Amino acid sequence: MRFAILGSGAVGGYFGAKLAKSGQDVALIARGAHLEAIRRKGLEIQSAALGDFVVKTAAESDTARVGPVDVVIVAVKAYDNATALPMLKPMISATTVVLTLQNGVDSVDEVAAVAGEGHVLGGTTYVATALEAPGLIVQTGVHRSIIFGEVFGDRSRISPRVQAIADVMAAADIQVTPVADARVPIWDKFVYLCPFAGFTGASRLAIGSIWKFPHVQEMFDAACREVAAIARAEGVTISSNRFDTLKEYMQNIPPSTRSSLLIDLEQGKRIEVEALQGAAVRRAKKHGVAVPIIATLYALLKPWEHGPVK
C-alpha cells in the first residue's frame, strides 16, 4: 500500500516509520527543520524496549508533490486542522482511505467535510513517543496500538478495507485492532482523555502529584462519567467494562505521567482545549447534559488555547 502521513511528528512519524521499515511506500508530510532532517539523514526512532532504527523515505511539505495514495493517516494536532486538512485533497483518489487518529471526537466530521464521508475511517492510538529533535522520535514503553474502523455507513461488521489496512499494520509490528464501529474506541478514549488532560493541565502537575488526594480521585471519576453521559446522548454505547479498565489503569499509572496538553502548556505551545474540553461542553449543551466539572476545566484552560497568556 502507498501511505501518506499528514503530521509526521511524534505519533504520525512513529507509525509512518514502522510502516516504511516493513517495506510499505510511505510519504511523510512535514515542515521546517524536521522535514530537512528527514530528507538529510532519514527519520530515526529510538526505543529502549523495541530497538532503534532509521528509515529513509519520501518527505514533502507540499502534498501536491505526493499525489493520490491508498491511505492517508491524519496525525496533526487538532488545532491545526484549518490549515492542515485542505492539504488532503491532492492525495485523494476515488479509492483513497483517510484514517484520522486525532484526539477528541470532532475529527471524523472535520475530515469528512474535506474528504467526504465515504473516504473516512476513524480511530485512536495509544503510544508514548516524543519528537526529541528534528528527525528524531523517542519511544518510551512498548505500547504502539491503533484501534480503528468505520464511522459512517455500515458499522455492523469489520469492513474489507479496514481489515486490509489492519493486516498491513500488523505486518509492520503495530498492535492493531480493527473494529466494526470506531465510535466506541474513540469515545472510550475520550471518556478518559478529556478529564485526564483537564486535571493535569489545570493543575500544571503530573498525575501522581494530584492522584494521592481521594477528593481528586472522586472528582476525576465524576468527570469521566460526565463524558460518558455525553456519549450516551450521542447514541454511542461505550465499552461495558470501561470504568473497570479505567480504574485499574489509573491505579497503576506511573506518577510522572503528563498529558500531551500539559506538555504543550509547559512548552508554551498551543493546546487542544477545543478538541477536548470544548468539544465536550458544546456537545453536552446540545443534548442538555450537565457537565459541571468538565465545564470548569474548560473555563480554566481556554485562556491558554493559543499559548502563554499575555
Image: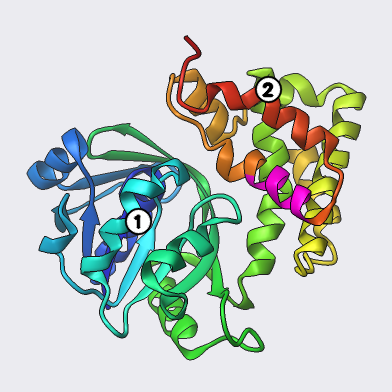
Residue visible at 75% across and 46% down? Answer: 249
Tell me how far mark 1 sits from mark 2, CA to CA: 28 Å
The answer to which of 283 and 165 lies nearer the viewer is 283
Question: Element at badge 1?
Answer: helix
Return the residue found at the far left.
40
Q: Secondary structure at mark 2?
A: helix
Mark drawn on residue 85: 1
Counting from the top left corner in percent of width and height, residue 17 is at 29, 56
Q: Is residue 146 visible?
A: no
Res 46 quadrant in image: top left
Instruction: Give whichever of 202, 163 is nearer the camera.
Output: 202
Instruction: Please state which amino acid type lies under the numbered disc 2.
Output: Leu
Give the mark, 1 or 2, whose residue is nearer the N terminus: 1
* Residue 309 makes an appearance in the image: yes
The reply to whether the magenta stretch includes residue 20 is: no
Question: Magenta segment: does it hold 283?
Answer: yes
- Tell which residue pokes out farthest to the top in this image: 310
Residue type, numbered disc 1: Leu
Q: Which residue is mark 2?
A: 300
Categorize mark 1 by other alpha carbons within 10 Å: few (<14), some (14-19), many (20+): some
x%, y% of residue 288?
Answer: 84, 52
Q: Which residues are magenta?
A: 279-286
Circle 2 Cα neighbour tier, 10 Å, few/some/many (<14 / 14–19 / ≥20): some
Nearest the viewer among 228 and 41 is: 228
Residue 299 at what x, y percent from top left?
69, 26
Q: Is residue 237 left or right of residue 193?
A: right
Seen in the picture, residue 46 relative to 112 is either above or below; the reply is: above
Q: Is residue 238 above or below residue 9?
A: below
